[in-house]
Amino acid sequence: MRESFCRTLSLLRRDKGVSQKTASTELGISQALLSHYEKGTREPGLAFVVRACEYYGVSADFLLGRTMLRDGTLVSPEALHDAADDKDNRLRGNVSALLHKKLLISAISLLFDLLGRSRDKALIDSASAYLSDAVYIVFRHLYEAAGDNPAASFGIPGALFSLAAAADMARREAQLSSRLCRAKGKRDKRDDVPTIPPLSHDMLLSEYPQLAQSLYMLLQQTGERIQFDADVLA
């Protein structure tokens, strides 16, 4: 939550288009102290959080990273839009974009259903963070290529974001692998070990007849691409 607060505080000031000097004056603190708050080297008190919320026109929940909505609305999983349920499931562009969208949505839906059955929050969080990093990287490249968009909208400088995101992906993959290693061969919930359902081709096709087809298609395409790269590097 602390990292989220620092990042949000800095981004809100940039979105408002004011300098640290201006913001600190209007918030009633020194520029040095505001800099410490934005960097996370010092923690503010409740009085400052209240003033910052009023100054930037956001809720405390948003400033503290508890919700992505500025008015403080807490969104439940049931309230989130699920693109897989769209009746008119089309995309602007070409057939390739629609195909990749359906493959990814279906494969990820299957993965998170399996992860959910483990009832292991650490495992689910690691997988989600890993996939979120990939989305972040693609969107940021797209955002920066789309025109003169302000780089300040993101907390990580442009020269570093690819390396930082790749490093975070590696860390999340290590966490995911470590968690799964603990679960290998275990089918109980003792010692805080996740319970992984037994997976087989027949089980996946039986329990996820449509989603499994998309998963296997994605695995085949990705496997062929990775194999090609492996052959080139060999």
Image (cartoon, rainbow, N blue to C red):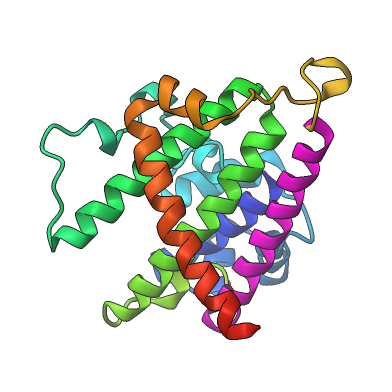
Vertical side of 150 occupied by 30: above or below: above
Along the line of sight, the residue nearer the viewer: 79 or 163: 163
As for residue 29 lying within the magenta part, the answer is: no
Relative image position of residue 158 (x, y in whole percent): 52, 80
Vertical side of 184 occupied by 38: above or below: below
Relative image position of residue 58 (x, y in whole percent): 44, 44
Q: In this view, does 148 lie to the left or right of 125?
A: left
Q: Is residue 182 left or right of residue 171?
A: right
> In the image, what residue occupies the spot 45% across and 33% down?
110
Count the numbered circles shown: 0
> In the image, what residue occupies the spot 44% across and 77% down?
151
Q: In this view, does 46 lie to the left or right of 203?
A: right
Q: Image quarter for residue 20? A: bottom right
As for residue 162 lying within the magenta part, the answer is: yes
> Which quadrant would the C terminus be assigned to in this image?
bottom right
Specify the segment rendered in magenta. Answer: 158-183
Whether residue 72 can be seen here = yes
Along the line of sight, the residue nearer the viewer: 73 or 223: 223
> In the image, what residue occupies the spot 67% across and 29% down?
121
Relative image position of residue 42 (x, y in whole percent): 78, 57
Vertical side of 3 occupied by 183: above or below: above
Along the line of sight, the residue nearer the viewer: 64 or 51: 64
> In the image, what residue occupies the spot 46% across and 45% down?
54
Q: Image quarter for residue 165? A: bottom right
Relative image position of residue 118 (x, y in whole percent): 65, 23
Residue, far front: 202
Vertical side of 45 occupied by 226: above or below: below
Q: Image quarter for residue 179? A: top right
Whether residue 70 can be seen here = no
> Which quadrant would the N terminus be assigned to in this image?
top right
Residue, far right: 191
State whether the magenta stretch is mostly helix, strand or loop.
helix
